[in-house]
Image (cartoon, rainbow, N blue to C red):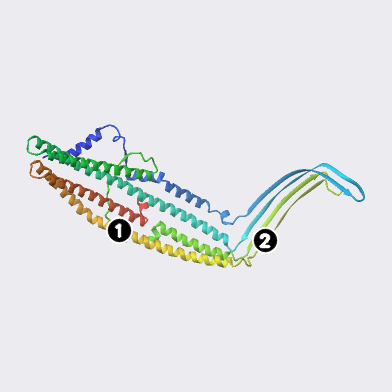
Amino acid sequence: MYSYRAAALFLVALALLLPGKVLSQEQLSLEQAIRLGLQNNYDIQIASKQEAISENNVTLGNAGFLPNVDGRASRTFSENNSRQEFNTGPDRIRRGASSNNLSYGANLNWVIFDGLGMFINLDRLKTLEKSGELFTKQTVEATLAQITASYFEVARQAFKIQALQDAIAISEARVEIAQAQYEVGVSAKVEILRARVDYNADRSELLLQQELLQNAKINLNQLLGRNPDIDFVVTDSIVVDPTLTYGMAATDLSASNPLLQRLQLDRQLAQLDVKAIRASRFPVIGVTSAYNFSRSEAEPLNEFQARFNQNRGYNYGLTLSVPIFNGFNINRQAQNARINLESVNLEYMREQNRLQSDLARAYSQYANRLQLLDLEEYNLKLAQENAEIALERYRLGLLTAIELREAQRNELVASNRLIDIQFQAKTAEVEMKRLSGTLLQEKQL
C-alpha cells in the first residue's frame, strides 16, 4: 500500500540532508528561552534598575534623621582709588589702595523633632522599596508568560507546517496517480490539471504558513532581547498540565498576586501620607551651630582704619518653628490625603474583582479545552485513517478526486484544530499560573 506519510518523511529527511540554513538552526528549549529572557529582556532590566533606585533611597539621611553640614570659603582682592575732602585740612587722595579678604566656615543644621515626620518618611521609603521589588516580580512574571506563550506559538506554527506537509504529500501522490492513469488512458487530462491546481494551492498555503512561523520567531527573539534574524527550532512540544483546579488557583489572590500586593502597599503609602499631614501640625525643633573665620588686610585710607583684621569663633543654639496659620492649607492637604486613601481602596477592590474575573475566564477556557483535547485527538485519528483509505481507493479508481480532496482537507482541518486547542489550553494554563502568582515559583523550581 502506498503511504503518503512515507513521502512526507522522505521530504523531511531530504531537507535535513541539504547543507545550509537548516543545519545551522539553533536548538532552543523552553528553559533556554526563559533563561535568555531573564538575562536580556529590556522590560526586566528596566524594572531591575528602578528597584535598585528604590533600594538606594532607603537611608537615614534621605528620611531626614541626619544633620546637614555646609562648608563655605571665599577669598577676594580689591584695589581702590579714593579722594577725601575735609573742612579742617587738606584733601587726601589715594591711588591703588589694595586689600584682600579671606573667610571660611561651616554650618550645621539638625532637625531633632518634626512631629515624627522623619520616622514616617523612613517607613515610606521602605514601603516604596518593597513596591519596587513587587513591580520587578510582576514584570518578570508577565514577561515569563509572554515568552512561554510566544515559544509555544512558534511550536504551534511549526506543527501546522508539518500538517501542511502531510497534505502536500497526498497532493503529490494524487498528481502521480492522475498522471499514471492518463498515460494508460483511463483518465482525462483535466484530472491532472485539477490535481496540479490543488497541489499548487497547498504549496501556496505552506508559504503563507512559513511566513507566520517566521513572524512568531521574530516575536520570540524580541522578547528574548536578541537579534530578530536569529533562526532556531523549538524542541519542546505543547504539553498541557491537566491537574490545575480553580480553587487551587483562586486561593488568596491578595497574598500571591504581585499586582494586588503592590496595591496593598499603595494603601499603606496613602495611610502614611495622612500621618505625614498630621505630623506637619507639630512644631519643629532643630539644632544649629557654626564655625566662622575671617581675615582682611588693607592699606588704610585714614588713621582710623585698621590695616589687619581677623575674627574666628563658633556659635550654637536651638531653633523652634511653630505652624500657626498657613491659609488652611494643612486642612486641605489632610482632606486630599483621606480622599486619596479612599481612592486607593477602591482601586484595590476594582483590580481584585478584575483579576478574579480574568482567572475565572482563564479556567473556563482551560477546562473546556481539556475536554476538547481527547475528542479532537480521536477525530484526528479518524481523519488520518479516512485520508489513507481515500488515497488508496482513489488509486484503485473507486473514489473521485473531489472526495479525495475532501478527505485530505478534513485531515488538515482536524490537525490544525487539535494544534489550536492544545495551544489555547496551554496559554490558559500559563495565564492561571500568572494570575495566581505561581508561574515564577514554578520556573525557579
Sequence-wise, the earlier of marks 2 and 1 is 2
Which residue bears the numbered disc 2? 319
Quarter containing the N terminus = top left
Whole-angstrom CA distance, mark 2 to mark 1, is 64 Å
Locate residue 249, reporting x and y percent: 33, 59
Q: What residue is rendered at 26% in x and 32% in y?
A: 18
Between 174 and 195, which is closer to the camera in this rendering?
A: 195
Q: What residue is rendered at 24% in x and 33% in y?
A: 17
**Residue 310 left/right relative to 194:** right
In the displayed structure, 219 sits above or below 342; it is above
Between 71 and 43, which is closer to the camera in this rendering?
A: 43
Q: Amino acid at mark 1?
A: Tyr
Q: Callout 1: helix, strand or loop?
A: helix
Q: Nearer the viewer, mark 2 or mark 1?
A: 1
Residue 253's quadrant in the figure? Answer: bottom left
Locate residue 40, reporting x and y percent: 41, 44
* Residue 173 visible in this rendered orientation of the protein: no
Q: Amino acid at mark 2?
A: Thr
Q: Which numbered tag is attached to residue 279?
A: none
Q: What residue is rendered at 26% in x and 41% in y?
A: 207
Mark 2: few/some/many CA within 10 Å (<14, 14-19, 20+): few
Between 164 and 233, which is closer to the camera in this rendering?
A: 164
Locate residue 265, reporting x and y percent: 46, 60
Q: Which numbered tag is attached to residue 363?
A: 1
**Residue 39 left/right relative to 175:** right
* Image mark count: 2
Mark 1: few/some/many CA within 10 Å (<14, 14-19, 20+): many
Residue 186's quadrant in the figure? Answer: top left
